[in-house]
Image (cartoon, coloured by chain):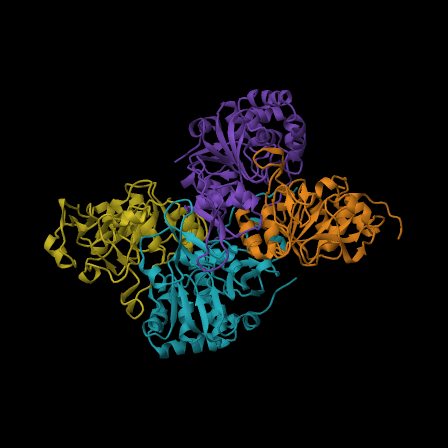
Chain colours: A cyan, B purple, C orange, D yellow
Amino acid sequence: MSKLTSLSEAIRQHVHDGDLVYAAGFTHLIPFAAGHEIIRQGIKDLILARATPDLIYDQMVAAGCARKVIFSYSGNPGVGSLKWLRDGIQNGSLEWEEYSHFGMISRLQAGASGLPFMPMRQTGALDLEKANPLYRRVQDPYGGEDVVVVPALHPDVAIVHVQRADSEGNAHIWGILGEQREAAFAAKRVILTAEEIVDEDIIRSDPNRTLIPSLVVSAVCHVPWCAHPSYTQGYYDRDNDFYLRWEEISKDEASVKAYLDEWVYGVKDRAEYLEKLGKETQERLKPGVRLSAPVNYGSY
Amino acid sequence: MSKLTSLSEAIRQHVHDGDLVYAAGFTHLIPFAAGHEIIRQGIKDLILARATPDLIYDQMVAAGCARKVIFSYSGNPGVGSLKWLRDGIQNGSLEWEEYSHFGMISRLQAGASGLPFMPMRQTGALDLEKANPLYRRVQDPYGGEDVVVVPALHPDVAIVHVQRADSEGNAHIWGILGEQREAAFAAKRVILTAEEIVDEDIIRSDPNRTLIPSLVVSAVCHVPWCAHPSYTQGYYDRDNDFYLRWEEISKDEASVKAYLDEWVYGVKDRAEYLEKLGKETQERLKPGVRLSAPVNYGSY
Amino acid sequence: MPEAEYNATELMIINAARLLKDGDQVFVGVGIPNLACNLARRTHAPKLQMIYEAGVIGARPNRLPLSIGDPTLVSGALSVCSMFEVFSLYLQRGNIDVGFLGGAQIDQYGNINATVIGDYFHPKVRLPGSGGSMEIAAWANRCYIITPHQIRRFPARVDFHTSAGFLEGGDARAKTGVRGAGPQAVVTNLGILKPDANGELVLAALHPGCTYEQVQANTGWPLKQAEQLEYTAAPGAEELRILREELDPQRIYI
Amino acid sequence: MPEAEYNATELMIINAARLLKDGDQVFVGVGIPNLACNLARRTHAPKLQMIYEAGVIGARPNRLPLSIGDPTLVSGALSVCSMFEVFSLYLQRGNIDVGFLGGAQIDQYGNINATVIGDYFHPKVRLPGSGGSMEIAAWANRCYIITPHQIRRFPARVDFHTSAGFLEGGDARAKTGVRGAGPQAVVTNLGILKPDANGELVLAALHPGCTYEQVQANTGWPLKQAEQLEYTAAPGAEELRILREELDPQRIYI
């Protein structure tokens, strides 16, 4: 049963004011197009969860979509800081809840596994554990050190971008996997965006590559270049120029407004964004071909 | 640095009397050749751990290698029972420790993750929990039901068969993954057997397929048909005739002795076994070709 | 009712298939449950999906699988994951609608013993053990049991709780907090048992030609009848044809 | 010593590279640690392997990676796994020899603050936070810190323990039971600090032309000297050549 729909329809149906949203992706496959659509639809009071909020959450905070962030590293990776998140936390206008990377993804792992919590070894650094009451401790019933635990996270909606999926939402992902799969299994609803919609036979040719099954997917959206200015392995490179430019754009309200007006409110959807981005930029970001060696599953 | 060695050398170096051995594989990739080599070398007092002991552990018990088994399902899959394990348990000559499947693989998952234990939800069935004191309970510090926990398992040696690996032990696996990866990361030493030793470039062409890294591997052995009469996806089918025959062979001591004399003690190594097995059987078990669709990693 | 010829195994498979719903995500073993699922897919439940404890999702086998990990289940499947993942992400997470269970003993409250006859530490007969059934019985939304109806298989109390039915009945299962609804039907060659409000297995349906007395004679507790005792329709010609010609032409299981 | 020209960043990279051993499994970020590892690989540690928190093992990048998740790290790598897996199977399991750490503040006992200046709930300056450094500092066998030597970066006590060094010194770290040995060296542009038996960072080595007084002036606690104060060799011509011509020809980091 096809779950194909437009991204704007999927956001309208599955993302509501006040929802806890997890737009997944560790530097890779960050679903910028979905973030922009949420901004365009004026959705409010969101709790934005992500290990690394990246520019997309800074933009969503700047656009007034969020009341709270949950994160483990709030920086512009390899460049600097996320001004709107930082200022929101500093001036008290934005609630926050903080973990280490492993704490954050362990929350998803617990959620994805149907467990109430995940244990991890102690780290000796107690200040975050003290600051965040959701960090707890549990005795090791085998006599070792107490373990630290974090509770399951069940996002209302996870947004997960992938390289290719069939129309039912069975998805192949390769390259950096981040927390894509855990977010999809942990969430109540999943919006899957894909660079390519392929025939089911392509998916079935390599079942070990299918990290997200249709079973957990609510909507499938065909969104080429969904991740720009982040990247999709094998499809396009990270647009590092933009990551550098955001440092400047984000400095004052006027330039952020100008950016949003031009690149978010000023375009209807990602197709228009892509047209506006231009062929030249697309060409610049296209990698050469480097194919995986095939494997033989055998015909039995 | 190449870790290539013969299987007999690898067993000699890494498997000692009294060791806890985990020969991995859920119906797929069961390393029969390694089990036979352990029998040939007359290694004793082993603790044999496996979710599904399968014929190979029945043979090792029959040959006198084991003092204890740890398992979650002790049957001849799709056929019947494992007579030597069953009789050993019934007559008290074999120690045993028992879990459900999820309990068993959760022990490996804890071991692989460096955790003291793994939690799982309650199942309502208490008898095994009562019979095996290593099942414990832990309070959910978030106020939910208590969870059941099992302790980390760290085999002295894991034996893991794979389709292809480079000479350092970076391995591609596809098809049913069972507990191959968890066993490798949980164990103190890892013997990797492979159908094919390939150039590092093949491995590097598809890093997402590398489930076991050289980092955890102690020895790499090139052992075509290592898994027969079990199977290797894409290389050969399960020899179901033998699974049926074992039901007969295992019925009395004389026929087991005859089998071991002919197929284990009577051959030097898997190459001789394979020659003895004959071209016809090999041809019968060869599947047709069914290749995975390639993915583009991109040249960056 | 036309007097179609069928055997006990065919009867059980066909009645099990009828219990499955379109779109069900079924955690399935080889043999009879596998045949029941495939029959349902070719009749009223084309969107039913089979998930194997070996970690295979959406298998599309070219031949009848002979083991739970048959390579034909993998080639052309939608997804394959590790055993830890299939038990955690699918079963424990609550993504499985139906689980199939079997065992040497099933008792009055649907508890199953697949572990041992006699004392656990001094076994009279040692059985294979839980495998995944402890978790399937607890976490699948609903479970079905398929088994021949013999008195030794239906004691009032099992020797060992390998997997939980309704435990001692009443709210005993609910109180454990396990997520699944437990065994919803036991399909035998004589009829179908279902739990009543107290979790006790009662006779819910009789197969053609079978009587209550026959079932009681093969059941180890005083067997109640459901208020509305039903009578199953005999296996249809088309069901039998699919089963015999398409699914198990070599008659390996049937 | 020949008066080779080099800048502070080059000096730090080269000295960090010298601390790495052949065969080390290094958990590494982009920028300076990445350059130090690659320099070590091309000089004395060809078998050193780089593992990125993004889940990349044995990267073989064709270009200088610009982010921790740069696609050039993936193409041609030995293995790629999920973030949960790299933190559990590699870091928590004890498979990582060396971790690199950074932060806004490093204190007398090697504790690091990358979270906040001022009060956590009413921050004066909010910093990015832990990322993986809480776990790296605890579980890597040994850790190195690379940072410019400035007084504001070296307070006697950090405002917030983002990751554990030797805590309050003495056996405080050992008592927590964390597996790693903690920070083994802090490489700055002036010299190298190392923990003494009490876990206190002391001056272990001076770079060419630097003095104890200079280091003390930039350190927020009375800085002890190691019993055997060492003097690092100036960056060699070959080290500089590799760094400038092969590793960062566009001078993005150096």
Q: Position of residue B159 (x, y in %)?
A: 49, 35
Q: In this view, does A151 lie to the left or right of C241?
A: left
Check the picture and name the quadrant holding the C terminus of chain A: top right
- The residue lying toward the viewer, choosing from A84 and A127, is A127
- The residue lying toward the viewer, choosing from D224 and C179, is C179
Q: Can residue C175 be seen by looking at this rendering?
A: yes
| Residue B42 higher or lower than D84, as above or below | above
Q: Can residue A162 be seen by looking at this rendering?
A: no
Q: Where is residue C226 in the image (x, y as percent from the top left)?
A: 76, 56
Q: In this view, does C130 lie to the left or right of A52?
A: right
Q: How many labels does the image show?
A: 0
Residue A242, located in which quarter of the rendered image?
Answer: bottom left
Q: Is residue B190 left or right of residue A253?
A: right
Q: Where is residue C10 in the image (x, y as percent from the top left)?
A: 78, 45
Residue at the image point whose x is 86% and y is 45% from the top: C5
- The residue lying toward the viewer, choosing from B95 and B206, is B95
Toward the right, the furthest residue is: C2
- The residue lying toward the viewer, choosing from A169 and D133, is D133
Q: Where is residue C61 in the image (x, y as percent from the top left)?
A: 67, 46
